[in-house]
Amino acid sequence: MSFKDKIKSSAKPIVRPMWLAIWHRIAFRVNSMIAGAVDPLARRISLLEMGTPAQQDSGILSSLSALARAFSVQVKQTELSERKFADTLEGLTADLRRLEERLDQSIAGDQQWLRERLEGHIMRDQRKLEDRVEFLRREILFEMKYGERTASSASSEFDRNALGDSAEPLQARIIAPDKLTAFGKGHYQLNLGCGLHPLEEYINIDMRELPGVDVVASVDGLPFEKGDVEKIFSAHLVEHFPQEMLKRRLLPYWKSLLRPGGVFHAIMPDCEAMIKHAATGEYSFAEFREVLFGAQDYAGDFHYNALTPDSFAELLKAEGFLNIDIRARGRRNGLCYEFEISASSPS
C-alpha cells in the first residue's frame, strides 16, 4: 500500500462520521421544512372540503402557491447547506493534503537524521576496529622481531636490516675504567652514540671503538645498574631507532638507569622544520633526503624514525618523564635542522 493510500485509509474513519452527521442534519431540516409546509395545506384542504367548489378551487391554488414558495425557500436553504458542506469538505481535503505533505517532510527528515546517525556510528566503530587491528598488528610484529631477543642482539638487528648480512651481538667493554671511577656510581653522565664527537665532561659511549670512546656498548645494553646515572645525553642518536623500539625498550631502559631527578637531554633532527624549509625551497632535496634517512655510510648510520619537538615530548610524557623543556626548534646545524629537548625522571 502506498503512503497516500495509507493516509486515505487513516482519514476515512474520521471523514465518514462527519459526512453522516452533516447529511443527517440536512435531511432532518429538509424533512422538517417539507412537513411544515404540507401540514397547513392538509388543514386547508379539510376546510375547503366543507366550502363551495369555487372556494375549494381558489383555496387549493392558494395553498399550492404557498407550498411552492415554501419549497423554493427550502431548496435554496438546502443548496446553501450543501455548498457549506462542500466548502467544509474541500477545506478538510486541503488540511489532509497539507498533513500528508508535512508527514512526507517529517519522514524524509527523520530518515536523513537516522542515516546520518547510523553513518556516524558506523564510521566511529570502523575507526575503533581499525585502531584495534593496528594495535594488535604492531604488538605481534614487535614480539616477532624483538620479543625473544636480548638487548644487544636487538640492537644488532638494525645492522642486518641495513647491510643485508648478519651482525654478532655487541658485548659491552669499558675502555676507560678510571674515568668511570672518577664520576662514581649515582653520578655517571653518559654521552650515548658519541661517534667522532666525544665530550670531556661525559662518559663517551659508542658501538665502535673510536678515539675518545670510554665504553664500547650498544645503547640498550650499557654496563650500568638502575639508578647509577645522573644524566644521559645524546646528539643525533634517537632517530636511528624505530618508533616501537624507542617507546617499548629504549626510553623505559634509559629512564630506569637515571637516579631520581636525573636528567635526559637529547638533540635530534627536527622533521617539522625540515619539511617546512623543503617546501619553500630553502632546503635542497639532497640535504633533506640524507638527514631523513641517514648518510648510510656504515652499520648504524641508518635513520629509522622522523620526530618533531612535540611528538618526542609526547613520547617522554607517556613514559613518565617530568619537566619536559623544548630548548630549541628548527635550529640549523650543518645539513640538518634540529631541536633540543630535556626532561627529568620522577624524584
Image: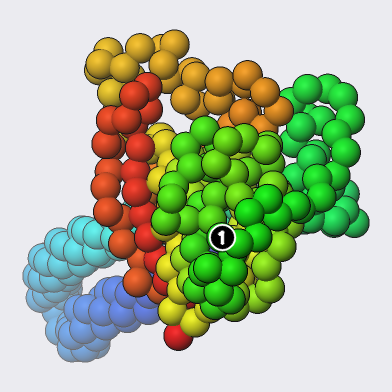
Point out residue 338 in the picture as x, y percentages from the top left corner. Answer: 35, 37
Q: Which residue is at a point 63% across and 29% down the rendered structure image? A: 302
Closer to the camera, 134 or 158? 158
Q: Residues within 10 Å of mark 1 (few under 14, many from 20)?
A: some
Inspect the image, locate mark 1, and give the three-letter code of the amino acid beneath it: Lys
All told, the count of numbered labels is 1
**Horizontal relation, residue 145 to residue 17: left or right:** right
Image quadrant assignment for residue 251? bottom right
At mark 1, the secondary structure is: helix
Residue at horizontal 43 percent and vertical 50 percent from the top: 200
Whether residue 24 is visible here, answered yes or no, is no
In the picture, measured across the screen, residue 13 lies left or right of residue 75, that is: right
Q: Is residue 91 left or right of residue 93?
A: left
User: Is residue 87 found left or right of 59 in the rendered image?
Assistant: right
Q: Taking 32 as reference, is 284 above or below it?
A: above
Name the quadrant containing residue 229.
bottom right
Residue ID for mark 1:
179
Could you tell me if residue 343 is visible in this image? yes
Q: Position of residue 328 (x, y in %)?
A: 26, 47
Query: Is 134 placed above or below 187 here?
Result: above
Picture layout, residue 307 above or below residue 142? above
Q: Nearer the viewer, residue 345 or 89?
A: 345
Which residue extends farthest front?
Answer: 178
Question: Where is the C terminus found, in terms of image quarters?
Answer: bottom left
Taking the spot 28% from the left edge, 23% from the top edge, the residue there is 277
Quadrant of the image occupied by residue 283: top left
Q: Residue at x 89, y 30 (%)?
A: 166
Query: Which x, y percent locates residue 165?
Result: 87, 24
